Amino acid sequence: MASNNSYTGATAEESSLDNSSNLETGLFITIFDGTIAITGTLGNLLVLTVIFVQIRFSTVSNILIANVAAVDFLTAAVIIPGDIGRQVCERMGLCYISPTIILVYRILVQYVITAAAVALFVIAVERFIAIAFPFRYRSLFTRTRAKICVAATWISGVLITGIFFGLNFVFIMNILCLFLVLFTLSLYIYIFSVALKHERKIVLLQVQYPDLKRSTTHPWERKSTKTMAIVLGVYLTCWVPSVVFYSVLRPADFLFRRIQPWINSVYYLSAVLNPFIYGVRSEKFRREVRRLISKLYPMDTNLSK
């Protein structure tokens, strides 16, 4: 009896320590995800405001960047707070969420993932046309067609999510998104190989003709392509771990519930990093941000005197 009592006491103590660890981990994840949600929401809202108010969709690239920012805004403003709610209620056991709300949330998550993959693919196609067909770019990819691509991003997300989620083929939908992202990556590899060939030709021409100017290429197009490649690289870095995790582990596995919050947090990082990438890479974006701030908070010249 003494041994049984000591065993029961040890088990209760281990359970108490495990619950305490879950609460500490859950609290840390909640604070971390909350910081990402606030920063990502404000950052992407700033990107959308600059493009809507200041730049007013002046280029095709701006329209497509606004599309990606809208997906990131939805992730930061809706998906992450929803996951925080699940963290507090389900994993920490502090409240209750109805199965219907959880189902709606899961559908929304799959929709956002699909929309993000399609949005990055559209940008890759636009960059491919800009680099591979520079003289036909303006006629092939107009602002009207860019807006159609934006609408297609959100509509395709609804269709793909509705079909595969309705048929309970979520795994196939994830494979489709992965294929789309890998195809996008292959497009960028081809784009940079073409750009490298162009650079080599220009170098050879400059050796033969020293007076030849370097205006045969478009530096803005190259920089824009590199910026969006960085965005894609960040997205892949943040998204691939979740694909591997959900493909290998099942909800019944011991490590699933312990690792899942960390995997989700890594995925959410892409939504908060993109606005910083735009700010670091684009001098025009920084200038428009300063102009927007000066409009919202004009300096009083009388006070300055």
Image: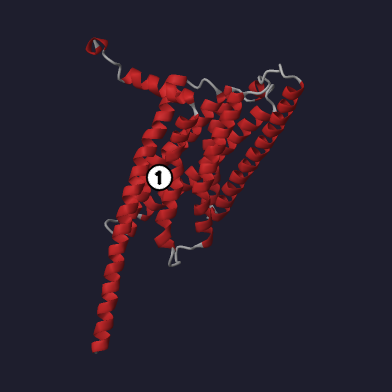
Relative to residue 196, is residue 243 drawn left or right? left
Q: For the residue marked with disc 1, what is the amino acid?
A: Ile
Provide residue 24's location: percent of width, then percent of height.
29, 58
Q: Is residue 57 above or below residue 97?
A: above
Provide residue 64's location: percent of width, then percent of height.
53, 30
Q: Is residue 146 above or below residue 92?
A: above
Q: Please say whether residue 299 is visible from this viewpoint.
A: yes
Of 108 and 70, nearer the camera is 70
Q: Residue at x 55, y 40 (%)?
A: 232
Q: Quadrant of the N terminus?
A: bottom left
Query: Circle 1 is placed at which residue position?
Result: 79
Provide residue 271's location: percent of width, then percent of height.
44, 40
Task: Tell me where residue 300 sits by quadrant.
Answer: top left
Provide residue 68's location: percent of width, then percent of height.
49, 35
Q: Is residue 128 above or below residue 98?
A: above
Q: Residue at x 58, y 24 (%)?
A: 220
Residue farthest along the right direction in this orientation: 208
Q: Residue at x 54, y 36 (%)?
A: 153
Task: Tell me where residue 22 sits by quadrant.
Answer: bottom left
